Image (cartoon, helix red, strand yellow):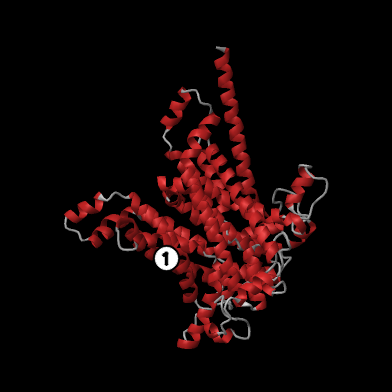
Amino acid sequence: MSYRMGARMKKKASYYVLNTITWFIVAIMIFPIYWMVKISLHTNGEILDGITGFTIPKPHWVNYIDMWDNINFSDFFLNSLIICTLTMILACAFAVMAGYALARFKFPGSGTFGMGVIATQMIPGIMFLLPIYLMFLSIKDTIGLPMIDTYWGMVLVYTAFYTPMSIWIMRSFFVAIPRDLEESAMIDGCTKFQAFVRVILPLSVPGIIATCVYIFLTAWDELLFAWVLTTTPDVQTIPVGIRLFVGQYNNRYDLLMSAATVVTIPIIVTFFLSQKYFIRGMTAGAVKG
Amino acid sequence: MSLLKLNQFTLGEYLAAPFIGLKNYSELLFNENNPVRQGLGYALRNTAIYTVVVTTAVMAIGLFVAILLNRDFPGRGFARAAMLLPWVVPSYVVGILWGFMWQKEGIINHILVDVLHLLDEKPYWLIGPNTIWAIIIPTVWRSWPFIMIVFLSGLQTIPDDLYEASTIDGAGKVRQFWNITLPLLKPIIAVQILFQLIANVYSYNIVAMMFGNGAGYPGQWGDLLMTALQRQTFGYWSFGAGAAASFLLMIGMLIIVGIWYRIFRSELRAE
């Protein structure tokens, strides 16, 4: 009897210990984000004096207005939004079609194609950076179409980059959908394409959302290519804007942190709205390989 | 491209630049004064340390927390979502934010020295050998939540019967972990290790943002291959040599992937 009591006590103790560890980890994870928001609400003087308190004594909201005025933030924001949205639509459309083909059809070279898609991920980005830069220059010289400093140039590059990963995410989604569904649709008189559009696509909406969020998040985060391929504020994205800003106002951490907060909040909101689908989509891809 | 003499003088000719065979490679490998080569040794060493440490830490923490979260306790959904937050923070923001927090009078030193009294005096994190930790820790902070979520969904596919049966056979929690959990998660671990290797070897944003606006040199202990290559090729306009270096890097990556495939071959096939 006493042995069993001891076991139960031990179980209970370990339950609370593990819970404590969990919440401690949560605290560590959130703290830097909290710190970012907190710093963005201090005056620059306070930051330079060194901040030691953990609470926000007097929110200094003016930082956000100053930041917005100082770095043409709305331009960068709009550019990022346009480029990322277009990329998302294009890359996702390609990924849906290619992913479906990879999941369902055996065609000559389908295995090679599938492996090739993954293999492209092993090539360092910088290796593309130089050829793309030169290619863009030479396109402009030969057919007069400007590519550097344009929306379509950036969208083209990003679409090419994020399509392979998206294909794999979509593929694993389609693989999980039973074949019978299309077969019975085709018995009912659908063509292959109709079966795809009417039966499979509606079922894979969670996967499509997951893929879209993935593409959007990665494009939103891209710095290296945007840094080299854009030179005017008309097309520069947020990462570039922030990097330029760091160069100009090295010590204005109040403005810097408010910019960082403004960039982060929309993504966090988008992410939590789509979290359910997104986690399911990403992990399905990762678990089934 | 790596076979062309491509620099600021020949850039206008694009791919019609003079063909110089393997000279870019030999320059890169054997000429110590080649501008692209400057600092590449440090960058290579740092990238190796960075990749190994980050990948190991991310895997270990991810698995540990996934097991922690794979229990019933109040606030589980909230804890999971809160842990995922850093993963959505853009990496350039991570660079700026941690660069600020690592400052000598910054919050991390404040916590370590004034609050917890772990250290006697405030160390410099952004200069000297500590720099490598200043780039590793934020990367781990940002990367492990995703791995955790993947492991968590993997754990949920393991049927409870297996654990129940082994409990009846008298296996403890630790043995269950080694004999049931780990082997069943191996395919997932294999795939995630590959993704982590690729992502970390080609990591750029965090370092680039933490140390000034591109021109800033992260120092002998903070430089990574990507930042070094970008700085040297675009800084000195030596694109041919840069392409050669990237190509060598890709060969190196292929070798790493080959080794990875040898180790995990059986797990991948079992899927």
Using residue A1 as the reference point, say whether residue B234 is left or right of it.
Answer: right
Residue B212 location, x and y as percent?
Answer: 70, 67
Question: Can you see residue A37?
Answer: no
| Residue in view at x 50 percent, y 78 percent | A150
10 Å crowding of disc 1: few (<14), some (14-19), many (20+): many
Task: Classify B34 as above or below B125.
Answer: below
Task: Classify A124 as above or below A209.
Answer: below
Using residue A176 as the reference point, say whether residue B128 is left or right of it.
Answer: right
Residue lying furthest top: A1
Task: Classify B248 as above or below B166.
Answer: below
Q: For mark 1, what is the residue?
A: A91
Residue lying furthest right: B120
| Residue in view at x 50 percent, y 23 percent | B170
Of A83 and A95, the residue lying toward us: A95
Q: Is mark 1 on a helix, strand or loop?
A: helix
Of B248 and B137, the residue lying toward us: B248
Q: In which quarter of the image is the N terminus of chain B?
A: bottom right
